[in-house]
Image: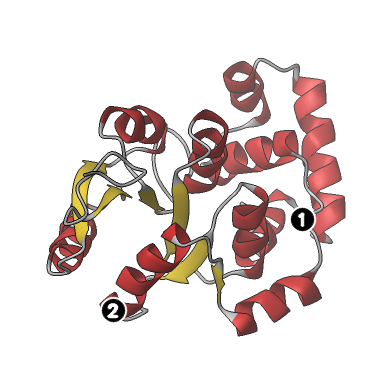
Amino acid sequence: MTDRYGESPAAGVRVLLAEDQSMVREALAALLGLEPDIDVVAQVARGDEVVAAAREHDVQVALLDIEMPGMTGLDAAAALRAALPAVKIVVVTTFGRPGYLRRAMESGADAFLVKDAPASQLADAVRKVLRGERIIDPALAAAALAAGADPLTQRERDVLRRAAGGAVNSEIARALHLSDGTVRNYLSTAIQKTGARNRAEAVRIAREKGWL
């Protein structure tokens, strides 16, 4: 006899871990592995590997870090929701920023947890999202509402991220297939929207609010 996921009743919840820091990923896998009803069946270090790994290993719950190479956890959450809508998504991050929470929910995440939460809370979140519950810290949810919506467009975020890495306008333009003038316009708009005086300050403000 099998359940609706094609597993025997004794089988654990099939979990994917996406985290670029190997020590953190392995520690999370070890902690979750202690739970009798949870099986970590896949681990990846890049956001752009999430969907393929989830499909290959038939996962039920994906735990995604936000800061990863290839694709952020938030973008990976959106891609996973589009490709495999039955998979539950738990975003786990070092930074409990209101902007991150809002973007995670908009990307289709079912839960948002910070990494300093107890391991038992993470395991409990895996079980709860599988039951259809949504897990959000009340204080962080209130802060997200108070902070308001992210005013930046995706292109403005792309340009700011490149600028944060030290790229000049011409380098950003080449990387994003834009003209130098378009890059200047995006930067100018981003600076205005964040209330910053220059691009460096715009990057800092956007990061503090969780918009990048």
Image position of 143 (left or right of 86): right
Q: Residues within 10 Å of mark 1 (few under 14, many from 20)?
A: some
Q: Position of residue 112 (x, y in %)?
A: 51, 65
Circle nearer the N terminus (1, 2): 2
Which is nearer the eye, 206 or 199? 206
Q: Please report the residue visible at 68 percent of the width from the left and 51 percent of the height from the top.
A: 106
The residue beneath circle 1 is 150
Which mark identifies residue 120?
Answer: 2
Q: Quadrant of residue 52?
A: top left
Image position of 97 (left or right of 19): right
Which mark identifies residue 27?
Answer: none
Name the secondary structure under disc 2.
Answer: helix
Residue contact between numbered discs 1 and 2, judged by CB atoms under 8 Å: no
Asked if residue 94 can be seen in this view, the reply is no
Which is nearer the eye, 143 or 12? 12
Q: Position of residue 72 (x, y in %)?
A: 48, 43
